[in-house]
Image (cartoon, rainbow, N blue to C red):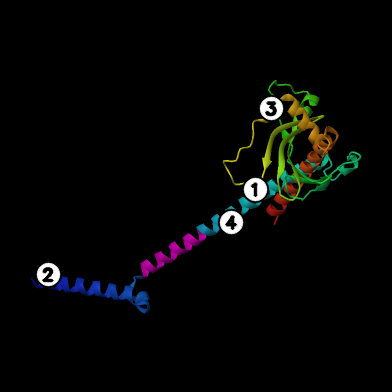
């Protein structure tokens, strides 16, 4: 019985000492056995050493990867500059009597044309080149060039009430196609229920021809759109080259 009492007292004392050692920072050194302290130090040093090796390895991998990416970007930049000079002045080929002012903002995909015709204001948003799908599988270069399409939105506004005609147009080499036609009223842009008319191709053939003539005398004709196709091709090359340079600049920091 005495032995059991002594054991319980010894156990109670050990627990109390251990509890105080945990609660009191000043007693940690004296309460924790030296073996544990040494083992803990080894674990800390081991973890720090492993982290250091990982960080060094990751840094080396990042540097190698970035250097390879920069080399590929430099090669792509050189190729983009060689294939076609994006800095050439395509405006030299602008047709005589070109009726629009060109608003071309670097970094933007589209170009805005502004013009006047008598009392009308004409604005044309010219989008990027769109290659058409080759349904016949013909790889001939001339045929491929003829499959290029430039989407445009032509707005013709007359008077001060904001009422305008909006044409969706596709420009092909030597051809202008009207895809859509709608009447836009001020404040009706968000009206999802507005009647926009029938499909353009469903209009009477004579009416279709009359609207093509309507656009032609306002500057939307083959000589103008052919120039725009060339202009947008150069712009696309220029924007792509700048995009590559921006990527390289970021990776090279």
Q: How many residues crowd around disc 4 within 10 Å: few (fewer than 14), some, or many (20 or more)?
A: few
Q: Which residue is mark 2?
A: 4
Of labels 1 and 2, the one closer to you: 1
Q: Secondary structure at mark 3?
A: helix
> With 85 as the anchor, is 27 left or right in this view?
left
The first of marks 4 and 3 along the sequence is 4
The first of marks 1 and 4 along the sequence is 4
> With 232 as the anchor, is 55 left or right in this view?
left
Tell whether label 2 touches label 1 (CB within 8 Å). Answer: no
Q: Which residue is mark 3?
A: 201
- Quadrant position of residue 126: top right
Rendered-image quadrant of the N terminus: bottom left
Q: How many residues crowd around disc 3 within 10 Å: few (fewer than 14), some, or many (20 or more)?
A: few
- Magenta span: predominant SS is helix
The vertical placement of 22 against 235, above or below, is below
Q: How many residues crowd around disc 1 within 10 Å: few (fewer than 14), some, or many (20 or more)?
A: few
The span shown in magenta is 34-49
What is the C-alpha distance between the residues marked 1 and 4?
14 Å
Q: Which residue is mark 4?
A: 56
Residue 200 place in picture, x, y as percent: 68, 30
Which residue is painted at 34% across and 70% down in the image? 33
Tell whether label 1 touches label 3 (CB within 8 Å). Answer: no
What is the C-alpha distance between the residues marked 3 and 2?
105 Å
Rendered-image quadrant of the C terminus: bottom right
What is the C-alpha distance between the residues marked 1 and 2?
69 Å
Q: Secondary structure at mark 2?
A: helix
Residue 137 place in picture, x, y as percent: 70, 21
- Quadrant position of residue 168: top right
Q: Secondary structure at mark 1?
A: helix
Q: Which residue is mark 1?
A: 65
What is the C-alpha distance between the residues marked 3 and 1?
54 Å
């Amino acid at each position: 019985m005495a032995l059991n009492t002594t054991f319980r007292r010894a156990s109670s004392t050990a627990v109390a000492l251990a509890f105080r050692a945990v609660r009191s920072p000043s007693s940690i050194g004296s309460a924790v056995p030296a073996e544990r302290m040494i083992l803990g130090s080894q674990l800390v040093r081991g973890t720090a050493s492993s982290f250091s090796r990982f960080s060094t390895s990751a840094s080396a991998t990042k540097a190698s990867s970035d250097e390879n990416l920069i080399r590929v970007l430099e090669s792509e930049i050189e190729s983009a500059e060689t294939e076609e000079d994006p800095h050439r002045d395509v405006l030299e080929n602008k047709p005589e009597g070109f009726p629009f002012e060109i608003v071309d903002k670097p970094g933007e995909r589209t170009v805005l044309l502004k013009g006047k015709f008598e009392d009308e204001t004409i604005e044309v948003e010219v989008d990027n080149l769109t290659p058409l799908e080759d349904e016949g599988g013909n790889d001939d270069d001339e045929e491929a060039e003829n499959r290029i399409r430039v989407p445009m939105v032509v707005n013709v506004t007359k008077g001060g009430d904001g009422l305008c005609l909006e044409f969706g147009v596709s420009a092909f080499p030597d051809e202008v196609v009207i895809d859509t036609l709608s009447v836009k009223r001020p404040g009706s842009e968000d009206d999802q229920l507005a009647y926009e008319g029938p499909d353009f191709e469903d209009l009477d053939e004579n009416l279709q021809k009359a609207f093509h003539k309507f656009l032609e005398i306002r500057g939307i004709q083959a000589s103008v759109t052919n120039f725009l196709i060339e202009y947008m091709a150069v712009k696309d090359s220029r924007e792509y080259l700048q995009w590559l340079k921006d990527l390289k600049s970021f990776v090279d920091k």
